[in-house]
Image (cartoon, rainbow, N blue to C red):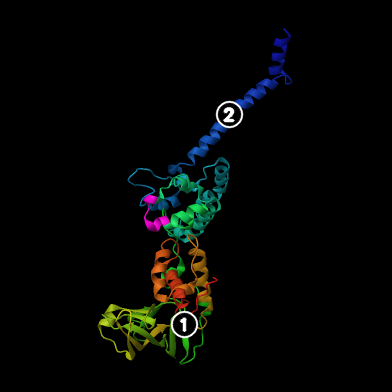
Amino acid sequence: MKLYCSIKNFFTKPSAKWGLGTILVGGMIAGVIGWQSFNTVLDKTSTEEFCVSCHSMKQPLEELKKTVHWANTSGVSATCSDCHLPHDTIGKYARKIEAAREVWAEMTGKYDEEGAFEKHRLEMAEREWARFAKDGSKQCKACHDYARMDFDKMSEKARKAMLPAKEKNQSCVDCHKGIAHHLPKQDEGNGKKSKFENLVVKSLSDNKTYYTKGNVELFSDETMNNTIGHLETAVPVMFVKSGTNADLVELSMWRKDKGFGRIWYDDFGKNITNAVLNKEFMATKPLFEVLERKEDPITGLTWQKVKMQAWIAKSNLIEDLNAVWANAESIYKTQCSTCHRQPDVAHFDSNSWIGLFNGMVGFTNIDKQTGKEVLRYLQMHSSDFEKHSESK
């Protein structure tokens, strides 16, 4: 009888209406239902359908569909959450809380305007790259496990890159950015803007050598109606005079006496591109002065030192190259050291750097214009111009 009373009291007391046992059992049932509901919501908001239900995510989905992460011979694909949601419980909860900011941005119309996604792509990409770098690309390695890679079946080029990466347990996005979505477009890469605007010389002196601040178009006359080519960044030119709409400069460079000879170089025998002239312009056999002829002992080609005047738009010349080289050096050291230790710049000559750099740049997110600037920095600081230090 006492046992019966004890059990009865447990479920009916201390409250006259609800007993302690009833409250506990009810709480447990409510907890189970709440926990199940929470996980259901968590799972639903982790599906690809939920992710792309936002207007702004339609664009990255279309980009993904064009990659092997969406369709391939094995039929194995990666969804949004496979890459962008941590697989461990705590990390997943933290990412969900963090994602509230992105949901708010969508709700408040941050990406509603045409081109808004592209405008903010770099900001979003850098946030994701930082997260991948912080956790060592754990999401990637859920499928691409170093321990299960058969390095013998890789190409020699891939094996040379992947073996050191395995030893360091390197983050995948150090080298493999832009494999599922487009890389951000940088203003410096459009050939119109320059990151060195603050260095532009406002008052130019006649017969003085200056340098181009970026990609600079060449024109046949002051009206700038007829484009004849362009100059690369940090190319030396002599200022002749200033017109109403443009500046007249003198080019003194080297060209190969072969074909149109429309690529003009910085020095004899060195493939450091200074200017690229239009094929149509060179087909007209323009007048330029040949100052010198020399035969390259390595290739047997005849090189000509030439001089020609051309017009450029105003505010395109700088005097100090230190900032240009410092910027290029910084990019080289940060972007080209993720896969391996980069060599001393003066270890190779200017011509060798072309193939070496072109082999590296594909593993970075360096845009085309910046890539040209970095290559020029490497060539202009190569063993042709500076002594190699074994201690570097």
Which quadrant holds the N terminus? top right
Amino acid carrying label 2: it is Val
Q: What stretch is highlighted in magenta?
A: 152-159
Q: At x 69% / y 14%, what residue is drawn?
A: 7
Q: Which of 184 and 343 is in front in this view?
A: 343
| Amino acid beneath label 1 | Tyr
Q: Along the line of sight, which residue is nearer the eye, 251 or 325?
A: 325
| Residue drawn at x 67%, y 20% as measured from the top left | 21
Look at the picture and state if 255 lies above or below 374.
Answer: below
Q: According to the image, label 2 marks what residue? A: 32
Lower position in the chain sequence, tag 2 or tag 1? 2
In the image, residue 48 sits, relative to residue 175, either above or below, namely above
Tell me residue 113's x, y (percent): 45, 58
Q: Is residue 28 visible to the viewer in this orientation of the structure? A: yes
Task: Kindly identify which numbered label has been placed on residue 235.
Answer: none
Dominant secondary-structure state across the stretch colored magenta: helix
Residue with the mark numbered 1: 211
- Residue at (28%, 82%) from the top-left corner? 282
Residue 116 locus on image (x, y percent): 46, 59
Badge 2 crowding class, 10 Å Cα cut-off, few under 14, some 14 to 19, many 20 or more, is few
Residue 38, located in which quarter of the rendered image?
Answer: top right
Please say if 254 is above or below 143. Answer: below
| Residue 232 rendering spot, x and y as whole percentages | 41, 77
Whether residue 298 is in magenta: the answer is no
Label 2, secondary structure: give it. helix
Distance from the alpha carbon under mark 2 to that under mark 1: 71 Å
Circle 1 residues within 10 Å: few <14, some 14–19, many ≥20: many
Left or right of 227, for residue 126: right
Is residue 193 among what the camera can see? Answer: no
Q: Is 179 placed left or right of 35 in the picture?
A: left
